[in-house]
Amino acid sequence: MSESEFISHAFTPGWIHRPEIIGETASRRKTYSEVGPTGDARGNRLFCADFESDLSVFGTVQPPWQQIIGSCVGYGTARAIMGLMVDRIASGRADRWEAPPSPAAIYGGARVNIGHNELGRGDGAVVAWAVEWATKCVLLQVAYRGVNLARDLGVDAVAKDWGVRGVPSYLETAGDFLRVGATTQIDSPESLCNALWNRHWVTGGSDTIHSSQRDRWGQCRPASRGGHCQNRCGIYLDQDGDTAILLRQSWGPSIPGGSSLITLKDGTTREMPAGVYGVKLEHEARALNDSGDFWALDMSGGWTPEKLDFGKAV
């Protein structure tokens, strides 16, 4: 099977480019360059990734998720939120892990609760809507009254249902306990880099589909066109001294294949989890500029698990 045939077979579309919706959301929010931390975000570091906190909290990196329908906006956004949650626990600002956030709830909330079914009955969503919903409601992968979100990963039955009906109103109050504190639009490649060095994980949709195989440096290149949302989960200075971004797929553990090692500027290596791969910043800059639908998330003013009574939320 050729590269293009493989991508066509594996690819489930899901990000919908609606510049007017992105612009309307952006008009009510600040950009990262306006409100993000100033100064030298990188310092002397060569590498920064969310799965560093996985090792601290779980003892191992967490596996990738696998979407079945065109729900990548829910998966990419929920995974960015998960990175923030794990960071808070790893840094001692929270003392327990309950469950991952629900991609199905983010997807349904984006399409219906925020988007009011404007996209019709087909699959797909806009990231701007997803982050807007995340500032109002984030549900966990647990059993709530009448629905078991813990069983939905890799099945997408709830995502399909809520993508038409929306998140039930009786669950919105529960999700308010876990909502994201702030979201800011990534307005430049520099903002993308600063957000990631500052561990403000990013969810972004673009029309770029990358190769299904990493090269010997653990990197992929743009290979096809199609709407897809992914979690930007890290950043590093690569083997050439260039800035590279770590992206995380939601197509299961086998995509992409190839080398899981990246090489840093100083010649040392890092092992990437399944589903994660490197992309040089020049490629990400083009995707960002074409899209506009990249958003950094911040929980510093919102989710406070150390004060959370999970009994009220679940």
Image (spheres, grey):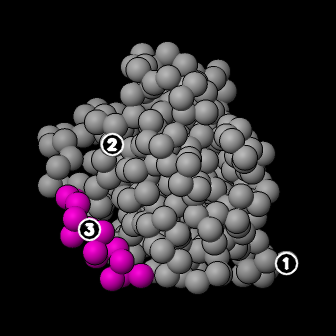
Residue at 64% over, 76% down: 123
Tag 3: amino acid: Ala
Q: Element under label 1? A: loop
Q: CA distance from mark 3 to mark 1?
A: 41 Å
What is the residue that sits farthest to the right in this orientation?
1
Question: Would you identify the image quadrant in which residue 18 lies?
Answer: bottom left
Q: Earlier in the sequence, mark 1 or mark 2?
A: 1
Q: Is residue 241 visible to the viewer in this orientation of the structure?
A: no
Q: Which mark is residue 181?
A: 2
Label 3: how many Cα within 10 Å (few below 14, some 14–19, many 20+): many
Percent coordinates x, y for residue 150 in the rendering? 73, 41
Q: Which mark is residue 26?
A: 3
Question: Disc 3 or 1, which lies upstream in sequence?
Answer: 1
Identity of the residue drawn at 26% across and 68% down: 26
Closest to the observer: 205 or 222?
205
**The residue under label 2 is which amino acid type?**
Gly
Q: Quadrant of residue 151?
A: top right
Quarter of the rendering containing residue 154: bottom right
User: Which segment is the magenta one?
Assistant: 18-31
In the depicted structure, whether residue 16 falls above or below residue 90: below
The residue carrying mark 1 is 1
Is 158 or 252 nearer to us in this picture?
Answer: 158
Dominant secondary structure of the residues highlighted in magenta in the image: helix
